[in-house]
Image: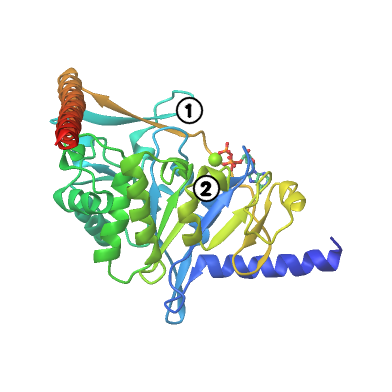
Amino acid sequence: MSQRGEGIMMKQGEELMRQLLLHTRKFGGTTCAIYGSLGAGKSTLLRFIVKKVAYVDGTKIKKETVVWRGRTVNDYWNSFDPARCILWFQENDYSEEYGRVPSFNDEYGNPIDINDLPVIMTYHDIPDLYNGIKTYGLGKINIVYETREYSFNEVIKDILKKRSMVSSREFEDKLVDIALFWYEFFYYLIANKTNEFLTVIADEADDLIMQSPGQLRWHAQLWLKDSMKSFRAKHISFFLATHHFSDLDGRLLSKINYGIYLKGSRLPNTSQLWRNKVKLVPRGKGYVEADTYGMFAFDDMKSKPHIVVHFNETEELKQRMEQRKEEADELRRKKHQGRSEEGREHLRQHMREVRSNAKKDQIDGMV
Ligand SMILES: Nc1ncnc2c1ncn2[C@@H]1O[C@H](COP(=O)(O)OP(=O)(O)OP(=O)(O)O)[C@@H](O)[C@H]1O
Ligand SMILES: [Mg+2]
């Protein structure tokens, strides 16, 4: 590319990045997926985004409220200013009485001094989490740990039953897919959020929007897609990072307005960018594409050793969980048996009818 050409590309790219990261009431929230091979700089770019993301309030520009999906391994929220962060845990995940308390180490196994951690708060359920963020976490980085024991509430059961037409037995299993915690969170936001700006960030997001989901999850991801349709108008922004677009459920890609391609990215067929240029883009630069495209630059940032969160459980709680798992397995076994018994009975009935019709035909033939 000529120097002039690259200059124009950079100008267009920086403008797109500005639109992506500076939200206005008129244009609302933005959704963006960041792609790149191992070590391309996705996590660094997410940190850059957290620092930059803001909204226009009258004549002022204000820092946006961020919800950061907390991970148990390889997380790096310790690189943010702890005074701007709140760590959120479900109340049973941070309760000596219940039997579960997290501990924080760095990736080399060194414990992290409790004084170096951000403020820790607990939530009861998703409405309580949202209220907590609104009360204490506006303008902050809210690092949210999904509950260890997510189970459906009645409203969510009802929604998924209607969408998937699966029997209510499917929902008797108490411990369900943790991604549903986030789908419920988004659904709650769409229905109840007031009009402040909120940015949700998920690194390594392929488990959240997985490419080939199982039966219930297949329907649940479509449910997420429906929520995503309202993100812009509800002033919700969503940034996710993964290696390749093909790691994600293709049905949801149309709801992601911006694509960012770092080193080693593959391009979806819908992209107007050039395959080879994107593959070889240097570290610290990337291509951004929405209705137009361009290039942008981002700096490396100092980082601390990654965080590992371990949930310590008492023996009693472990036994309780084990028992619940066994009960759920037993239920599943019975369900399976019941189904095949039903099937066999159906077949027997069908054969009886076939035989009796054949007999009738024989008799009619004789008459
Ligand atoms: N803008 C940049 N300039 C120079 N080096 C960078 C830049 N961004 C990231 N790096 C360096 O590249 C390395 C990998 O960065 P990062 O962890 O952000 O990549 P990643 O895509 O998230 O990797 P992974 O696929 O392992 O999650 C780090 O050592 C980081 O310091
Ligand atoms: Mg990373």
Q: Amino acid at mark 1?
A: Glu
For label 1, the SS is loop
Q: Is residue 94 visible?
A: no
Q: State which quarter of the image contains the C terminus.
A: top left
Quadrant for residue 71, please give it.
top left
Which residue has dot 2 on it?
241
Where in the figure is residue 145, as x and y percent of width and height? 32, 42
Which residue has dot 1 on it?
107
The foreground one among 186 and 176 is 176
The residue furthest bottom is 59
Where in the figure is residue 21, as x and y percent of width and height? 52, 65
- Residue 359, above or below 223: above
Ranked by sequence position, the earlier of labels 1 and 2 is 1
Say which mark, if any, is on residue 283. none
On whether ligand 2 comes within 8 Å of the CB at mark 2, the answer is yes
Where in the figure is residue 196, as x and y percent of width and height? 34, 69
For label 2, the SS is strand
Q: State which quarter of the image contains the N terminus.
A: bottom right
Q: Residue at (47%, 34%) from the top-left corner?
A: 74
Q: Quadrant of ligand 1?
A: top right
Tag count: 2
- Disc 2 packing (10 Å; few <14; some 14–19; many ≥20): many
Quadrant for residue 312, please give it.
top left
Q: Residue at (17%, 35%) from the top-left corner?
A: 357
